[in-house]
Amino acid sequence: MSLWKCGIDGCAERFEDVESAIIHQTVEHDRHECTVCGSIVPDGYFAIRHAFEEHSRAEYVRAYDADSTAVRVREDIKAAIEDEADLRAVVEELKRRDAL
């Protein structure tokens, strides 16, 4: 089993399961302000999810001065997390902690 790395601002925390990594990102790191719309969202997975579900790829590229490689990397991260994570359990835990 591979470990999940946080990766926010050089954070090297590693987790045995993806759910713990998402909870860590949400609870331990500052919120992210979306450059496209100004929404404040948890950094990490939730910020990536917001960017690609609420905005077009073109909006993301323009707002974040990104290229196609940056988009693909984030889309791959989002897909890998969603393939493995029990997101319902994550949301329930974050609500229990009053973090959402």
Image (tube, grey):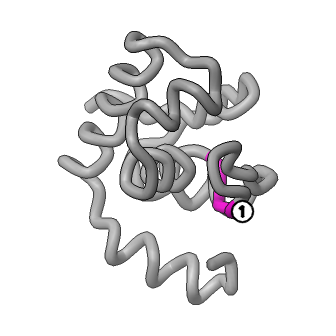
Compared across the picture, whether 21 is left or right of 24 comes to left
Residue drawn 43% across the image and 31% down it = 58
Q: Where does the magenta region start and end?
A: 39-43
Inspect the image, locate mark 1, and give the three-letter code of the amino acid beneath it.
Answer: Ile
Give the percent coordinates (x, y) of residue 33: 74, 52
Q: Residue extending furthest right?
A: 30
Residue drawn 49% across the image and 44% down it = 48
In-front residue for pair 73/82: 73
Give the percent coordinates (x, y) of residue 70: 46, 17
Residue drawn 65% across the image and 58% down it = 42
The quadrant where residue 6 appears: top right
Q: Is residue 81 above or below residue 6?
A: below
| Residue 41 belongs to the span the image colors magenta | yes
| Residue 23 belongs to the span the image colors magenta | no
Q: Main secondary structure of the magenta part?
A: strand
Compared across the picture, whether 51 is left or right of 34 comes to left
Q: Secondary structure at mark 1?
A: strand
Give the percent coordinates (x, y) of residue 63: 63, 32
Q: Is residue 93 above or below residue 44?
A: below
Residue drawn 34% across the image and 67% down it = 87
Q: Residue extending furthest left?
A: 83
Number of labels in the image equals 1
Query: Which residue is under mark 1?
Result: 40
The quadrant where residue 77 appears: top left
